[in-house]
Structures are given as C-alpha cells and as structure tokens.
Image (cartoon, grey):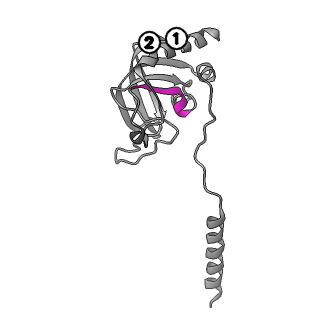
Amino acid sequence: MTQPFRIRAVFATILGLAVGLAPPASGLTVTPMSLSDVVESADCIVHGRIVAVHASRDDNRLPATWVTVLVERTLKGANESELTFKQFGGAADGAGARTLLDPFPHYAVDSEVVLFLAKPSRLGFTSPIGGGQGYYTIAAPLPVDAAQGTTSAYRMAPQQLDGFLKEVERLVGRR
C-alpha cells in the first residue's frame, strides 16, 4: 500500500466514523407559547382570507414567499384592507427548488386565517410568531387519517372563531 493511499484510507475511515457516530441533526425547534405570549410578541394581528401567494427571489436574491391577505378585521397593528407580507423561503428560482423551512407555515389561496405576525426584519421578512403558533386556519376539522402532512397551522372550527377573536382582543387590550 502506498503512503498517499494509506492516508486517504485512514481519512475515509475517520470521516465515516465521525459521520456514523454523530448525533442526528435536529431541525429548528420552537418553544411552545401561550396565546398571551403570542399576542404580546406580535406586531400585527389580522383575520382575513389569503388571496395570493407568490414565491420567488427578493431584491437581495433571497428565496421568499409573498402572501396577500384580504383583511376582514385588524386586532393589532395598522388597520389596512389588504396586507402583503414576505416570509423567508419558497420556490428559490421558479425551477421548483423548495427552501421553505419548517416550522414556517405554508399558505393556500382562499384559506380563512388569523395571523399573528412578527415585526418585519430590516430585509422586510416576517412570519407568524413561534412558527405555526401564530397561524390559525378557520376550517372544519380534518378526519384523523387526513391530518397527516398538513401545514403547520392550527386548525379552528368556524364556530370557535368569534370567541377566539374576542379573547385575542381582550389580550391586546391588556397590554
């Protein structure tokens, strides 16, 4: 065995052991938050319907998803009839490369939602507080077996919406 071959063999063995013995990589973890904490942390809270979702690269060439919501009710923040926000991730270049990271939610046009959004970063990115903890969809509950692989949003039955919004308003008023 030649000297360079031995060095490569030893290196490959050490690398293989290091990879094999390394602990599994953990994804982004999110600490559970109370509704009161989510409300307090949010810069903007709205109830509305998603009318557009567009993924591309922003002016800084970063992958982004723009979500437009037709606002029915503003509970915190600027009172506007329409809100468009930019979240990190999405289709990176139109070629289908996905960079949307969990626990960031995925959005669907025509979804009725309640969003608790963080203050936008200096690059204009925002997302729901605590990942999916600041994203509620208003829909009938899914059957148990259909619940696998859904978005990271909390689902709320329509009949729960009024009580939930009253509680959020109460918490906003307490600040």
Q: Residue at x 38, y 40 (%)?
A: 146
Q: Residue at x 47, y 17 (%)?
A: 46
Q: Quadrant of residue 9?
A: bottom right
Image vertical order of residue 160 relative to residue 56, above or below: above
Q: Quadrant of residue 23?
A: bottom right
| Side of 61 relative to 21 (left or right) | left
Q: Residue at x 48, y 23 (%)?
A: 115
Q: Is residue 31 magenta?
A: no
Circle number at residue 166 = 1
State the extent of the magenta-drawn residues as a range: 131-139
Label 2 sits on a secondary structure element that is: strand
Q: Quadrant of the C terminus?
A: top right
User: Spatial distance from mark 1 to mark 2, Cα to Cα?
Assistant: 12 Å
Give the mark nearest the N terminus, 1 or 2: 2
Q: Quadrant of residue 174?
A: top right
Q: Which residue is mark 2?
A: 73
Residue 141 position within the rendered picture, expressed as x and y whole percent measured from the top left: 41, 30
Q: Quadrant of the N terminus?
A: bottom right
Q: Crowdedness of circle 1 by 10 Å Cα count: few (<14), some, many (20+)?
A: few
- Looking at the rendered image, the disc whose residue lies closer to the viewer, 1 or 2, is 1
Residue 18 position within the rendered picture, expressed as x and y whole percent measured from the top left: 66, 67
Of residues 43 and 49, the one drawn nearer to the viewer in this rendering: 49
Q: Crowdedness of circle 2 by 10 Å Cα count: few (<14), some, many (20+)?
A: some
Going by the numbered disc 2, the residue's amino acid type is Arg
| Side of 83 relative to 131 (left or right) | left
Of residues 123 and 66, the one drawn nearer to the viewer in this rendering: 66
Going by the numbered disc 1, the residue's amino acid type is Lys
Residue 91 position within the rendered picture, expressed as x and y whole percent measured from the top left: 39, 42
